[in-house]
């Protein structure tokens, strides 16, 4: 194995740490989503419980964060939907090249998400506020897209390095 890949393997712990941070953020958001949703549902049927007027907007915002961040986490695990039906008929190097091409395309998408998402968040988002929470900028509604772009870029760089490494490492057929 070339020396560069050995050096790059040493930062795997950084990728794992970032993965765990984003995973824990998603877990906290899910718990908050469940608690707020439960509160709203209970308030509909139990009149003694006051219903929060901000709940539904906050639930939708939290769901947006979870959706895009969990998609970024799937990149790290290589768990996105992929077409593998023909993989057993194709050359290993061709499959690796196609995986690399797909990962580069997703990296381009991630950069677009970061740049355009940030532009939307600071322009459109900063001009508005939530209806039920007028003190809170809609920046936070648009912010999941550039945040996920950052996470996707981080994890796609790792995937691309792993794809390139597959060109140089012989597969053991055991």
Image (spheres, grey):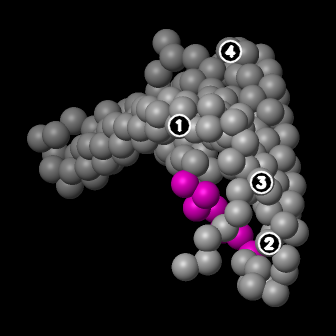
Name which residue lies at 15% across and 50% down: 46
Q: Which residue is mark 4?
A: 126
Residue with the mark numbered 1 = 12
Residue 147 is inside the magenta segment: no
Q: Position of residue 78 (x, y in %)?
A: 61, 58
Tell which circle, 4 or 3, labels the residue nearer the N-terminal end.
4
Residue 168, label in figure: 3
Disc 1 element? helix
Give whichever of 102, 121 is nearer the camera.
Answer: 102
In this view, 105 is above or below 115: below
Q: In terms of sequence position, does the residue under pointer 2 or pointer 3 come before the other?
A: 2
Mark count:
4
The answer to whether 38 appears left or right of 92 in the picture is: left
- Tell me: 75 left or right of 117: left
Near mark 2 (Cα within 10 A), the count class, few <14, some 14-19 or many ≥20, is some
Real-space CA distance between mark 2 and mark 3, rounded to the nearest whole angstrom = 12 Å
As drawn, 86 above or below 101: below
> Closer to the N terminus: mark 1 or mark 4?
1
Looking at the picture, tell me which residue is in the foreground, 125 or 97.
97
Q: Give the extent of the magenta segment.
A: 77-83
Tell which circle, 2 or 1, labels the residue nearer the N-terminal end: 1
Of label 4 and label 2, which has the lower sequence position?
Answer: 2
Callout in the foreground (3, 1): 3
From this viewpoint, is residue 51 visible?
A: yes
């Amino acid at each position: 194995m070339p020396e560069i890949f050995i050096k790059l393997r040493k930062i795997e712990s950084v990728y794992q740490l970032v993965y765990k941070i984003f995973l824990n953020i998603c877990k906290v958001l899910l718990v908050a989503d469940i608690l707020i949703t439960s509160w709203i549902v209970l308030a509909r049927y139990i009149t003694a419980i006051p219903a929060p007027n901000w709940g539904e907007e906050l639930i939708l915002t939290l769901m947006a964060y979870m959706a895009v961040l969990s998609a970024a986490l799937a990149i790290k695990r290589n768990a996105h939907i992929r077409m593998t039906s023909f993989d057993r008929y194709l050359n290993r190097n061709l499959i690796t090249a196609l995986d690399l091409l797909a990962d580069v395309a997703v990296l381009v998408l991630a950069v677009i998400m970061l740049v355009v998402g940030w532009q939307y968040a600071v322009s459109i988002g900063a001009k508005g506020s939530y209806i039920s929470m007028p003190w809170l900028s809609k920046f936070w509604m648009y912010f999941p897209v550039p945040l996920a772009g950052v996470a996707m870029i981080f994890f796609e760089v790792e995937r691309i390095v792993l794809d390139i490494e597959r060109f140089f490492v012989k597969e053991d057929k055991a």
